[in-house]
Image: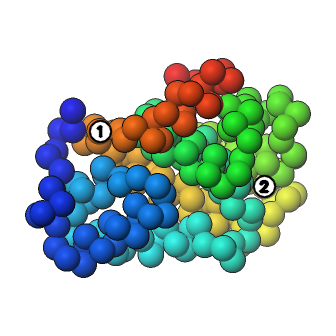
Amino acid sequence: MSRLAPLTEAELPAEIRELMSSGHARMGFRANDGLTFARVPAMIPGLMQLVAAVYGPKGLTPLPLRKLVAYVTSTAAGCIYCRSHTAHGAFREGVAPEKIAAAWDYDTSPLFTPAERAALRLAHHAGFGPVQVTDDDFAALRVHFSSDAIAELVAVIALFGFLNKWNAVIATDLEDTPMAILREKIEPLARTAD
C-alpha cells in the first residue's frame, strides 16, 4: 500500500489529466506514480520532458539498450516498481524476454555485445547506493561510445535514480500490466539480484 495517497482522477488538474492520458496511451496502462507526482504538479511536465530527452528517437545509443540500462539500474537499486516498469518498457520496445532476463548476467551471457556489457556494467554499478562506478567502467565505455553517448547513458541512470527513490520511498502500488510482464515473461527466465 502506498505510503502517500495518490490523487484521484477527479482531483487532477485538467492539464495534468491530459498528460496522464497521453502516458496511458503510450504505455498501455495508467502509471500510479503519476498520481503521486501530481501532488507537485510542475513535476509531471518536467518529468515528461526529461523522459522524452532520455528516450527520444534521435538518441545516440540504441533505444533497446537505454531500456536495458534503466532495467539494470532499477534492479541494482532494488525498486520493484521501476524494475517492473523498465522490464515492461524493454519488452514493448522489442527486447526479447530472454535478453531482459539475462541482463543481470551481462558479463557472461552471449546475448550481449562488448558495448552492451560496458553500458550495463555502468548501470549496475551506478544503481547501488553508494554508487560503485569506477574509472575502469568509464574506460570500458570509451572503447564503444562517444562522450555524448556516455552522457546519454548516464542521463538514463540519473532519471531512474530519481524514479527509483520516489517509488521505493512512497511504496507506489504496482500496476497489473508491468507486474505481469516481469512475473510471467522475465522472472521465469532470470537469475536476478533479488
Q: How is the image coloured?
A: rainbow
Residue 193 in the image: state x and y as whole percent.
58, 24
Where disc 1 sits, the SS reads loop
The tag on residue 58 is: none
Residue 88 visible to an observer of this rendering: yes
Q: Judge by depth and name the residue closer to the eye, 21 or 13.
A: 21
Residue 107 in the image: state x and y as whole percent.
80, 33
Residue 173's quadrant in the figure?
top left
Question: Of all residues shown, which one is farthest toward the left?
Answer: 11
Q: Judge by depth and name the residue closer to the eye, 172 or 12.
A: 12
Residue 136 visible to an observer of this rendering: no
x 78%, y 55%: residue: 141
Q: Which residue is mark 1?
A: 173
Look at discs 1 and 2 and give the one toward the viewer.
1
Residue 114 in the image: state x and y as whole percent.
87, 46
Three-letter amino acid code of the residue under disc 2: Leu
x 41%, y 46%: residue: 164
Q: Judge by depth and name the residue closer to the eye, 101 or 134.
A: 101
Distance from Cα at disc 1 to Cα at disc 2:
35 Å
Side of 126 where 43 appears, left or right: left
Three-letter amino acid code of the residue under disc 1: Asp
Where disc 2 sits, the SS reads helix
Q: Which residue is mark 2?
A: 141
Residue 131 in the image: state x and y as whole percent.
53, 43
Near mark 1 (Cα within 10 A), the count class, few <14, some 14-19 or many ≥20, is: some
